[in-house]
Amino acid sequence: MKLHYFDGSTTCRPIVMFAAEAGLPLELVPVDLFTGEHLASDYTAKNPNQLVPLLEEPDGFLLAECSAILKYLADRAGHPAWPAEPRARAQVNARMDWFNTGFYRCFGYGVVYPQLFPDYGFADPVMQREALTRATRKSERLFGILDAHMLAGPGPFLGGMEPDLSDYLGVAYATTGELVRWDMGHWPRVEAWIAAMRSRPAWAGANAGFEAWRDQLRADAA
C-alpha cells in the first residue's frame, strides 16, 4: 500500500503512527504541499480535492480522508484500536467525529492556521483579532471538555490503558497548538495524554517532520 503524504501534515501523522504500531507496511510517497506538488495534474487525477493523505492500493483502490483511512487500516489488521464490539466501536467513532468537526474546525482552522497561513485569516486586522479571540474562547471550552470528561476514565488514553483510533487522531489535532505556543498548562489530563502518546514507540518517526517545522517556527520567532 502507498500513502501519499506530507510529513508535517496534521492528518497524515496519525496514519503513519498507527500503521507503524499496528505492523502495517506503508510505502510513504511524499507530496510537498509547500511547493505545490498536490496541485500537479497526476496527483489531482487521483485526488481531485488536491489534499493529503491519500491511500493507494496495488489494485488501484484509492481512499482519502484521515479518519476513513485509519478505520480501513484498523479493519484490515483486525486491530483492537477500532474494536469490533458495536458499542465500543461507536464510542471510538463518536470521539473521532468530535475531533474532526467541532474541535479541529475551531482550534486548527480558527486558532492555529490563521496565525500561520494568510489564506486562513482576515486581511482586516480588527476582524482577525476578533475572530481569533472568539476561536480561542471556544477552543478553551473544548479543551476543558477533553480534560474534564473525555480523559476522566482509567488509563492515560481516551481508549483507556491502550490508545484507540481517537487517540491517534486527536493527539495530532491537539498538538498543532505547539506551532503557535498554545499553553496546555490549564488542562493537566490533556498534558498527561499528550505525554503518553509522545512516549509511544512510533511517535518519533511519525512526527519528525512536524516537530522540525515547529522548531523552525520557534527559531524564526526568537
Image (cartoon, rainbow, N blue to C red):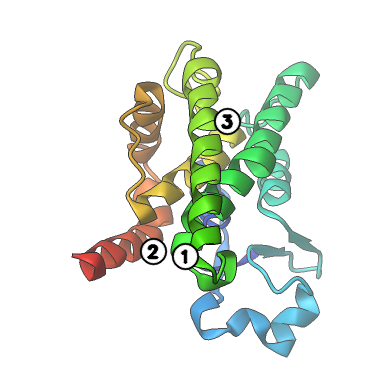
Q: What is the quadrant of the N terminus in the image?
A: bottom right
Give the label on residue 164, or none.
Answer: 3
Q: Callout 2: 10 Å neighbours few (<14), some, many (20+)? A: some
**196 sits left or right of 51 in the view:** left
**153 sits left or right of 88 in the view:** left
Which of the pair 24/174 is nearer the observer?
Answer: 174
Give the label on residue 7, or none.
Answer: 1
Q: Callout 3: 10 Å neighbours few (<14), some, many (20+)? A: many
Name the residue that disc number 2 marks.
209
Q: Indicate the amino acid at tag 2.
A: Gly
Percent x, y for residue 192?
Answer: 35, 26
> Is residue 213 positioned above or below 105 on the image?
below
Res 32 seen here: no
Q: Residue reaching furthest bottom?
A: 41
Q: Indicate the amino acid at tag 3.
A: Asp
Q: Secondary structure at mark 1?
A: loop
Give the label on residue 118, or none.
Answer: none
Picture residue at 49% right of the left edge, 42% below the top: 136
Q: Indicate the amino acid at tag 1.
A: Asp
Picture residue at 50% right of the left edge, 12% below the top: 153
Percent x, y for residue 112?
Answer: 47, 54
Which of the pair 149/114 is nearer the observer?
Answer: 114
